Image: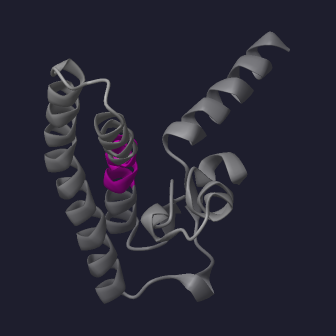
Amino acid sequence: ATAIDFAFHLGNFMWMMFPIYPVKPKERKTPTQVLLYAAECFGSLAVKLIAAPLILGKMHELSSGPKRSTLVTKSALTVLFCGNVLCGTFFYDFCSGITCLVTMGRYECLAFNKYPWMSTSIAELWGKRYNLLIHS
């Protein structure tokens, strides 16, 4: 029973790292859609990899500056922190793009989020747009 428990927990952990699932035949993408989706994933990956160090640098500059305790600085740090969290999902962009390309749309990665910046409320952000792995 111990080996089976270990395998079960290892499988759950690997699914969290690589949340890949088969796509129903009716919902599969055409080869053009596969290429466009992969381009979107890799474009998002590139933006996040470029933005993350810029955001962290600005956060360090603001937090170590002489005006670090002002309300404006704290608000800016909060916004930058949120941007940094969104940039941290670059791995899922990479996983999604590679999985879609390699399997030609037969398998996909479960999206970590769905355009969280388009949320109109906190409830929509946490309930429908961000951290979808937990909700699945």
Above or below residue 84? Residue 48 is: below
Q: Is residue 56 left or right of residue 31?
A: left
Instruction: Classify residue 35 by image quadrant.
Output: bottom left
86 magenta-colored: yes
Q: Residue at (64%, 33%) from the top-left corner?
A: 11
Q: Residue at (60%, 31%) from the top-left corner?
A: 13
Instruction: Classify residue 24 by image quadrant.
Output: bottom right
Q: Quadrant of the C terminus?
A: bottom right
Q: Which residues are magenta?
A: 84-95
| Nearest to the observer: residue 109 or residue 57 | 57
| Nearest to the observer: residue 17 or residue 40 | 40
For the stretch drawn in magenta, what is the main secondary structure? helix
* Residue reaching furthest to the right: 1
Q: Residue at (57%, 62%) from the top-left corner?
A: 129
Above or below residue 43? Residue 35 is: below
Image location (x, y in percent) of residue 19: 55, 49
Instruction: Classify residue 22 by image quadrant.
Output: bottom right
Q: Is residue 70 left or right of residue 54?
A: right
Image location (x, y in percent) of residue 83: 33, 48
Image location (x, y in percent) of residue 72: 31, 41
Image location (x, y in percent) of residue 44: 26, 61
